[in-house]
Amino acid sequence: MSFILQGLGVSGGIAIGRAMLMSHATLEVSHLTIAPRMVDKEIARLDAAIKTVKRDLQLVKETTENAPAELAAFIDIHTMFLDDPELVDKPHAIIRERRCNAEWALVQQMERLVGEFERFDDPYLRERRFDVVQVVERVIKELLGHTGRPVMKLAKGVKEETLILVAHDLSPADVITFKEHRFASFITDVGGATSHTAILARALAIPSVVGMENARSLIRDGEQLIVDGARGVVIVNPDQRVLEEYQLRKNQIALENSKLKRLKTARSQTIDGVDIQLFANIELPGDVPGALEGGAEGIGLFRTEFLFLNRGDMPDEEEQYEAYKKVVKGMGGRPVTIRTFDLGNDKDIVPQGMAADRVKPNPALGRRAIRLSLAEPRMFHTQLRAILRASKYGPIKLLIPMLAHAHEIDQTLAALEMAKSSLRGEKAVFDEEIEVGGMIEIPAAALAVGLFLRRLDFLSIGTNDLIQYTLAIDRTDEQVSNLYDPLHPAVLMLIAHTLASAEKVEIPVSVCGEMAGDPKLTRLLLGMGLRIFSMHPSQILKVKSRVLKADINELAPTVRRMLRLDEPAKLRDALEWLNA
Ligand code: PEP
Ligand code: MG
């Protein structure tokens, strides 16, 4: 029977293949009563499985070249759990007391630990329950005789490229292993748009859909699947007609992608000779090679809060300095825009000890981003010093998130001056003239953009938040995601006003929200006056192909007329016409 499942597409493209279920129901283990004489043997069986998994994890970490540091850190956490008496010794006691099998004892203890993690206020610690589950799943697989890395032992004649992995979650060790293989795609039950699963999924750069909720229980091993990564759709057992249609689209995408690669070295210029800068958004230093591969002329947004990924403590100045330096050096003289921490909101990344008193139930409207940085001057000072020190190695621009008030800008500039002066005292080398920019992502900032233009060197429009705040919809809440509309006339008015005001005083403005990476919006944004786009690296060449075919002289009057429309249907028709 053919049916369709909906999830969240995290990497575009289409994959067609057979389902391979991972970790299928491994945690639904049966309870067995064992004879008293078997108790010691059962404990030894558990210990041996744990030892093997530990060795396996170490092997994965050591044998994977260029494993990103953040993935290695995840593996260390998993290994640490396997050394923890709570997970290792307690199941021994359960086996002895209840005379049960090792699998059942381990799952009982896991459930108890997960319950404890769930009670933590600190979101970082709460997240760790997923690590406990992942690590226990590996041990259970080992106990049951399944391979911890099923991907390694494919049946003879089965090609990796024809397989679509269906998993509950994606552990960091899985990701490292997958990187060395060429699976067609993968889908997972868990994962929201900003979850770790989605972040790791993007790193694999194959079509994938997360947050399917119950794919593992609905899909059977070997069933044929179509994964439409762009739409977040999975078609199970498609009929012949649908299959042919998708095969055709897949071929078209492959052809388009190979054509696009040829554009990598082309100068990014419109037909009428206007240079357009195409930059990459990155989350971690390890994203730099991908940005260059994607054709980025620089980094338009480095979301530094991801340095907190999978850890609770604050990265100290040295660690931050090394991370920023790595990005700057990696970009080889191209500009790098480093945004100060945007902590305290949707990314579930909150420094240890800060969560309870610093983050309120409505974090998007709370002490987030620059508000948190200004409330934590030591943290801010450390970050500013680290960024300034890295500016010795190449052109860095400093970008400040979530500004709304003039006094926030003034305080930020004063904090920067303090960081500079402390470095001067140490005779450290840094860029005295470092440019400072502000994110325009609050409607108030877009409307009163003059106060930004008078104080700052450049602006960057964060459309993801600008849309959230303009339309009063939580960007992380799937229940209102249908109301998230980049083409809402109010959103377009705010962007247009920002661009036009900045143009008058010749202050550069970029867009670094998702809108910049949507090729359907390239002509519209060009016509509105945008000249700097920053996006996920995978989108750069797609946007470039639109830039190369655009004539701004011709577009601008049409776009001006479009912006006078405030009927959504008319706006959409006009956009279609603009792109035709
Ligand atoms: C935005 O809000 O558009 C933006 C680029 O920042 P982030 O997505 O990190 O909030
Ligand atoms: Mg934002």
Image (cartoon, helix red, strand yellow):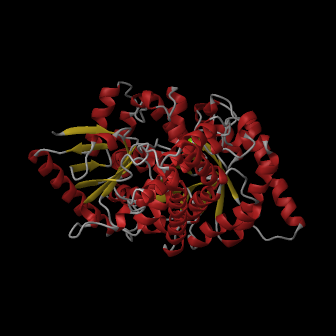
Task: Tell me what residue is drawn at x 29 percent, y 62 percent.
Answer: 257
Say which quarter of the image contains residue 148. Answer: bottom left
Task: Tell me what residue is drawn at x 12 percent, y 51 percent.
Answer: 244
The answer to whether residue 550 is seen in the rendering is no
- Ligand 1 resides in the quarter of the picture at top right
Instruction: Please identify the quadrant where the N terminus is shown.
Output: top left
Task: Tell me what residue is drawn at x 47 percent, y 56 percent.
Answer: 138
Image spot of residue 404 (x, y percent): 67, 35
Image spot of residue 280 (x, y percent): 49, 58
Q: Is residue 561 above or below residue 254?
A: above
Tell which residue pokes out farthest to the left in this image. Answer: 240
Image spot of residue 109 (x, y percent): 57, 44
Q: Is residue 424 left or right of residue 529?
A: right
Q: How many marks?
A: 0
Task: Tell me what residue is drawn at x 64 percent, y 34 percent.
Answer: 119
Q: Is residue 72 left or right of residue 230?
A: right
Viewer-closest of 457 and 85: 85
Instruction: Please identify the quadrant where the C terminus is shown.
Output: top left
Viewer-closest of 157 and 208: 157
Image spot of residue 235 (x, y percent): 23, 43
Q: Is residue 385 left or right of residue 21?
A: right
Say which quarter of the image contains residue 428. Answer: bottom right
The answer to whether residue 67 is seen in the rendering is yes
Q: Is residue 244 left or right of residue 67?
A: left
Viewer-closest of 206 and 101: 101
